[in-house]
């Protein structure tokens, strides 16, 4: 089977999974992100709301999907933490979570969907959960047969902003923490951003994401803090970006600004911009040429 045919088959699978009510994949494990309870509250309580896009999340979870053994002698695999979008108001697991699990499984890569808490006026909460997800994967690396040095993050839209936040502000862990998960580092080894929210400046920001994360009238310091292009350094992980020129929800300028800063700081980066595709899963469903480029990039990063 040729690489092109395989790519088209996978794109067909993605299209099916993002346009039907197919049953979600069964996870290998479901973990409470904070088994003893989160260190802070987002002010929400009660059951989650919705299935396609989930709201009212107060107890974040990790949905862990381990691939069938595809490597010789059980060689450890790469892993990707997935942060779906939803404007920091919901987490769209059905369209930007489950289809990605299957795509990564086809490549022998572990997938971990992070159902992060929504800010609800508490801006620190989502990034705290996403960093905790990175630490948790590394903490369980031996158990899950994952290489702790090949753990990336893949975010979409507002989830792309969350992934870029984790990719630009991270730490190596606290070696003295009584919670051994907190001893792990939170820096992704590589970053994948699809139609991401990046800047919080008025000229290109996604207003809904900004409002839900920072409130209706954020101060200048807060805007700069959450404009990820302003936080890029030489330590930001290698990044693959995808965006469409006709995206009216999150202007392509967001990816352009992040890409420019990556290049400026000498960070390996690849940016695919398609003329059409709009915002959301149509951006990659309608542009199948991204997948061969993505596979080459994964291989160059040692993720395959």
Image: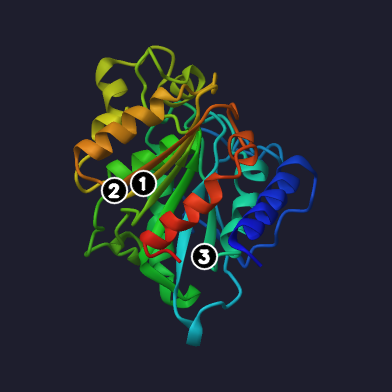
**Residue 283's quadrant in the figure?**
top right
- Closer to us: mark 2 or mark 3? 2
Count how many numbered circles sit on residues in the image. 3
Residue 184: % across, % down: 31, 62
Residue 282: % across, % down: 64, 34
**Structural distance between the alpha carbons of marks 2 and 3:** 21 Å
Q: Which residue is mark 3?
A: 109
N-terminal-most mark, 3 or 1? 3
Q: Secondary structure at mark 3?
A: loop
Report the front residue among 123 and 102. 102
Q: Which mark is residue 268?
A: 2
* Disc 1 + disc 2, Cβ < 8 Å: yes
**Structural distance between the alpha carbons of marks 1 and 2:** 7 Å
Residue 189: % across, % down: 33, 57
**Structural distance between the alpha carbons of marks 3 and 1:** 17 Å
Residue 41 appears anywhere in the view: no
Split into 4 quadrants, where in the image is the N terminus?
Answer: bottom right
Name the image colouring. rainbow
Residue 19: % across, % down: 75, 40
Q: Secondary structure at mark 2?
A: loop
Image side of residue 201 versus residue 283, left or right: left
Residue found at x 47% / y 76%: 145
| Classed neighbour count for the residue bearing mark 2: other residues with Cα under 10 Å, few (<14), some (14–19), many (≥20) | some
- When the figure is inspected, residue 41 is found, relative to residue 175, above or below; the finding is above
N-terminal-most mark, 2 or 3? 3
Residue 23 appears anywhere in the view: yes
Q: Which residue is mark 1?
A: 239
N-terminal-most mark, 1 or 2? 1
Residue found at x 80% / y 45%: 21
Image side of residue 278 versus residue 14, left or right: left
């Amino acid at each position: 089977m040729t690489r092109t045919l395989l790519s088209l088959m996978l794109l067909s699978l993605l299209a099916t999974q993002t346009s039907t009510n197919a049953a979600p994949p069964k996870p290998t494990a479901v973990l409470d992100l904070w088994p003893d309870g989160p260190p802070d509250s987002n002010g929400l309580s009660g059951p989650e709301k919705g299935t396609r896009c989930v709201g009212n999340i107060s107890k974040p979870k990790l949905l862990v999907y381990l691939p069938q053994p595809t490597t010789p002698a059980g060689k450890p695999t790469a892993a990707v933490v997935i942060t779906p979008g939803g404007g920091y108001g919901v987490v769209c697991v059905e369209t930007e979570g489950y289809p990605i699990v299957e795509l990564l499984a086809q490549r022998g890569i572990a997938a971990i969907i992070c159902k992060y808490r929504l800010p609800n006026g508490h801006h620190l909460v989502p990034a705290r959960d996403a960093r905790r997800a990175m630490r948790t994967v590394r903490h369980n690396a031996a158990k899950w047969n994952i290489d702790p040095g090949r753990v990336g993050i893949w975010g979409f839209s507002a989830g792309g902003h969350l992934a870029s936040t984790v990719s630009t502000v991270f730490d190596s862990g606290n070696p003295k923490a009584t919670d051994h998960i907190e001893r792990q580092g939170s820096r992704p080894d590589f970053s994948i951003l699809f139609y991401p929210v990046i800047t919080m400046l008025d000229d290109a920001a996604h207003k809904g994401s900004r409002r839900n994360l920072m409130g209706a009238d954020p101060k200048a310091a807060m805007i700069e803090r959450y404009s990820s292009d302003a936080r890029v350094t030489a330590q930001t992980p290698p990044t693959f970006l995808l965006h469409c020129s006709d995206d009216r929800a999150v202007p392509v300028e967001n990816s352009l600004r992040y890409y420019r800063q990556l290049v400026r700081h000498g960070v390996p980066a690849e940016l695919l911009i398609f003329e059409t595709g709009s915002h959301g899963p149509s951006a990659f469903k309608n542009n199948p040429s991204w997948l061969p480029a993505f596979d080459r990039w994964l291989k160059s990063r040692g993720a395959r």
